Image (tube, helix red, strand yellow):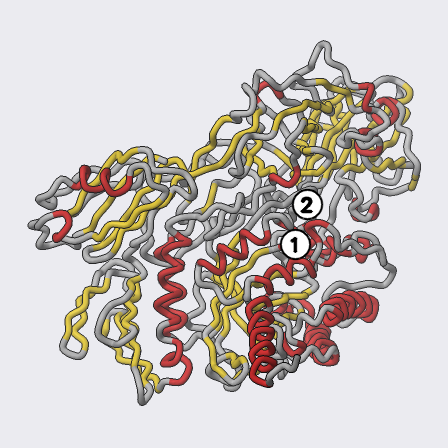
Amino acid sequence: MGTSNNSINFALFLLLLIIALISPLFYALEVSHDGRAITIDGERRILLSGSIHYPRSTPEMWPDLIKKAKEGGLDAIETYVFWNAHEPLRRQYDFTGNNDLIRFLKTIQSEGLYAVLRIGPYVCAEWNYGGLPVWLHNIPGIEFRTANNVFMNEMQNFTTLIVDMVKQEKLFASQGGNIILAQIENEYGNVMKSYGAAGKAYIDWCANMAESLDIGVPWIMCQQDDAPQPMINTCNGFYCDSFTPNNPNSPKMWTENWTGWFKNWGAQDPHRTAEDVAYAVARFFQTGGTFQNYYMYHGGTNFGRTAGGPYITTSYDYDAPIDEYGNLNQPKWGHLKELHGALKSMERALTHGNVTNIDEGNGVSVTIYATNETSSCFIGNKNSTGDATVTFQGTEYSVPAWSVSILPDCKNEAYNTAKVNTQTTLMEKKKNQAENEPVALQWTWMPETTSDTVQHGKGHVAASHLVDQKVINDISDYLWYMTSVNIKDDDPLWSDDMSIRVNGTGHMLHAYVNGEHIGSEWATYGIHNYVFEKKVKLNPGKNQITLLSATIGFPNYGPYFDTIESGLPGPVELIGRKGDESVIKDLSSHKWTYEVGLHGFDNKLYSSDSRHASKWEAENLPTNRMMTWYKTTFKAPLGTDPVALDLQGMGKGEAWVNGQSIGRYWPSYLAEEDGCSTEPCDYRGEYGSSKCVSNCGQPTQRWYHVPRSFMTNDVNTLVLFEELGGNPSLVNFQTVAPGTVCGNAYENKNMELSCQGRPISSIRFASFGDPQGTCGSFYKGSCEGGNDALAIVQKACVGKEKCSIQASEDVFGSTNCSSTATRLVVEAVC
């Protein structure tokens, strides 16, 4: 039977439609730019992007994270490429598990989002050694990030490898993929001066090398004011509204809007308010911005030994819009989502309109973007203390201090950065319902064998000098330095007051003399050296001196960061004191024996298939004992909520779940006691990392993320290596979920509440008027709507997963709030 042309055409139409729906970016895109915007397939765009680093989460988390980014109004996902994760040893590559870059990029593509690939391959990112492999340091003749052929050859090899992999999968937009921008080098302009003319030659080489790879999309260089053409220079920082590209044909781009800050051991938890982040973004687009990326949008976790610094914590939460565990960080996520909607409604005017700026004085400005068809406006108030009343085109607008009002039609305020109409969510840690922890956790233990090194000084390598710890290519945190010294009865050193003095590099040091531990030393972030000195009792004759160095992440930033010493550079000295006189014996040039790592790591005690699995002991469980391994089994918490491991009571070490490292732990390192406030953080005024902090005097990091994909539904194994000494009796698993949610909506806006998948169980507080306080401690103000707000909200919300109510006098009754902005505030329990 014949088939009509109409039927064939209709079938072809359906096929093409299905392909288009499945692969929204299946055809080649032309990506270009001018001084106004990035242009994709002939359309000027404003682009909203967010950083998600694939190694700091898991492949199982990626789809949900990217979906939430899309729901939050983003167009693109930005990521670094981590050289040392992919090439841990020279020419030995790893693109498996959470290092599967291609799978990550395809996951972004499957959600219909663009990707920005920041190859670097130096990345900073508070990542170990800035993402550069430590083995690079040990190549003869190498100098990092300068006009050095050895380094440039290695960098070109890796960059080409990544580009070729991406091309093979046709992921550049020019091939029909979703990668619209790529980056070479990273923040080099911040340090280039230190490298002199060779630095300029290097950055020129980077540009030429990148262009030669012919990827068909623009290349960017961040923080590079003299970026060679055709590189686009971009801005990083808390605020980039005053940034101007170095070429009039380059669009104004912001590659890193720091949504919070990183945390180091000993530091408090940093917070950046939703109002301030939104203000920074709105100011950027008011002043001609076209591409803006949140660093971070999801921070994640420094699994294994990937944290840099040194002294960067395992958590890389960053106070990002999506928290470390993958939960929405409210109100930041929702407040920014509303901002994105307002900006997107103005896209045509922002990318094509004529710009008029009106200075109203006292930090207040009006910016008009006008085309023949439409006009859109911003009213900005950068005064950090005074609210402003602005009369514009015959209408009066109230603009709070340090805020921007957005008027998509130049008439009606659709959004103000200081007026949050999004719920606040207070997350709670909840007990493991699968078993009664911590009582249910039955621990076994095993001592770390140290007699060979501590007592006998046995190692595999010897040298007559002290070595930098980078010589071991970072295959372990641990390196033993061992020597012996003979002291005769008549040695001038001999006295009743003797000590050992060691010049360290800021990492951890454990010192042993004649088999006895005499002390340990460590520092904090930014400190690259210290002097350890302890009194010792030496014996006539041979004395064994053993020093264990434990790195806590290699430096990741600054000029010549790669050359900062690690381990024990010396001198190592014995000092004998007699009255005012001191005799010093320098041991630095003695014969030193070296041993890499610890036996427990070599024997893979953290793995279920270790050949030493039968040697764990159940009796006489020690506590507060250095160099001890602990093991237990547990049931995975019920449900699907993210899981946190509470390591309260432990000292310092590393933790594994079913053989997978969840990172270094150090709950005994307390955060600084000063700097926290009980008052709500004031969003007004420029933000700095110490402005709004919490957790003073508490463990820097008590809870550690255990991805669900690390666990099975059956029995799971937890192994801890305890370096300093701790007590595992309090260790337990918890889930992370919304506990309290607080809605806020200004008059005539909708207040929305959600418990993210669980029902709202009760309403603690509801007020329509001028309620005071913060989420968890609200109280009624001086005015109130005539109707019973609590009863209205209870009826609308209790028992539901989410609810929406209009904040209006029609619903809650009239108020006498004449001098303040009327709003609805609700506190609910999930």
| Quarter of the rendering containing residue 718 | top right
Q: Which residue is mark 2?
A: 553
The percent position of residue 577, horizontal first and vertical second, equals: 74, 25
Q: Who's the residue at 42% across and 54% down the image?
A: 333
Q: Is residue 785 left or right of residue 344?
A: left
Which amino acid is tagged 1? Asn
Answer above or below: position of 673 versus 226: above
Q: Who's the residue at 75% across and 36% down the image?
A: 549
Q: Who's the residue at 91% across and 41% down the image?
A: 464
Q: Is residue 478 left or right of residue 423?
A: right
What residue occupies the far bottom of the structure in this picture? Answer: 372
User: Could you tell me which quadrant the N terminus lies in?
Assistant: bottom right
Q: Secondary structure at mark 1?
A: loop
Which amino acid is tagged 2? Gly
Q: Which residue is mark 1?
A: 556
Q: Secondary structure at mark 2?
A: loop
Q: Who's the residue at 21% across and 61% down the image?
A: 387
Q: CA distance from mark 2 to mark 1?
A: 9 Å
The percent position of residue 677, horizontal first and vertical second, equals: 35, 39
The answer to whether the residues at label 2 and label 1 have Cβ atoms under 8 Å apart is yes
Q: Is residue 597 left or right of residue 7?
A: right
Answer above or below: position of 285 versus 635: below
Answer above or below: position of 84 versus 545: below
Residue in the foreground of this view, choosing between 790 and 598: 790
Label 2 crowd bin: few (<14), some (14–19), many (20+), radius 10 Å: many
Is residue 223 in view?
A: no
The percent position of residue 284, horizontal first and vertical second, equals: 41, 70
